[in-house]
Image (cartoon, helix red, strand yellow):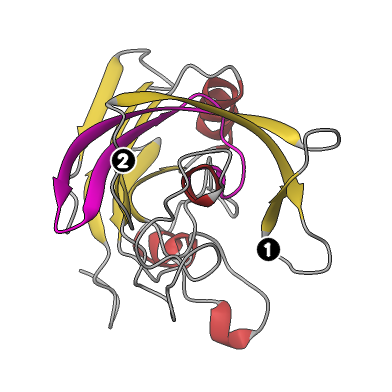
Amino acid sequence: MNPAGDDLTILYADDDLVVVDKPSGLLSVPGKGEENQDCVVARVRARFPKCMEQPSVHRLDQDTSGLLLLALTASAHRNLSKQFMDRLVGKRYVALLDGVLEAAGGVVDLRFRLDPDDRPRQVYDPERGKRGVTRWRRLGVEDGRTRVEFMPQTGRTHQLRLHSAHEKGLGCPIVGDRLYGSGTGPGQLLLHASLLRFRHPVTGRPMEFASKPPF
């Protein structure tokens, strides 16, 4: 039974891990302040009493929707975290960009870092930034907007959002992006984690999950 007010979609669960389909606007982990305690982690821990205290293996931005993987045990957390660290996890995202891209696809390779004067915004910095690499392909054009699929090769904070918006990237912000585009509030970002591929931390068998974008 779901806790009151908990509409989080669980796609898969066993004794070691949980895969959820996160809605846009919900935090992945708790934030600062009492008003930011509702999140995927809190809801998963409420549903799975044996869940470890810090089950997050990776995160999605608050406004990004889609597939999120959490570990229920410490050993599963170590294994899954290493898969992410070693870039053994397959990830794909779908987004609508606020503009028309002529190219059919390509690779964005930019270095960027946190702007300490404007957290959590990331800024392009070819000297001190950390490298972010994203493969992408155009899926179609819809009413002056381009639907794209992203295949990130690294997992930097706001990587897909900055790679879309920056002039040295695609030059088209993701629709609804309140940091790098014209979004005005939470829950408007049209960026969805649509595929997640990894190996089960105990059995080693390949696992793959897909989620259709809600836009």
Q: Quadrant of the C terminus?
A: bottom left
In this view, 70 is above or below 209:
below
- Tell me which residue sits at (44%, 72%) in the image: 182
The x and y percentages for residue 9 are: 22, 58
Q: Quadrant of residue 78?
A: top right
Name above or below for residue 74 compared with residue 30. Answer: above
Say which quarter of the image contains residue 15: top left
Q: Please state the horizontal and vertical placement of residue 198, each as a whole percent of the image.
A: 37, 22
Dot label at residue 101: 2
Q: Is residue 127 among the parts visible in the rendering?
A: yes
In the rendered structure, the answer to whether residue 86 lies left or right of residue 49 reads right
The residue identified by callout 1 is 120
The numbered disc on residue 208 is none
User: Horizontal and vertical percent for residue 68?
Assistant: 38, 46
Q: Which residues are magenta?
A: 133-160
Residue 139 within the segment the image draws in magenta: yes
Comparing 51 with 58, the one in front is: 58
Q: Is residue 58 left or right of residue 183?
A: right
What residue type is disc 1 on? Pro
Circle 2 crowding by C-alpha within 10 Å: few under 14, some 14–19, many from 20: some
Magenta stretch: helix, strand or loop mostly: strand
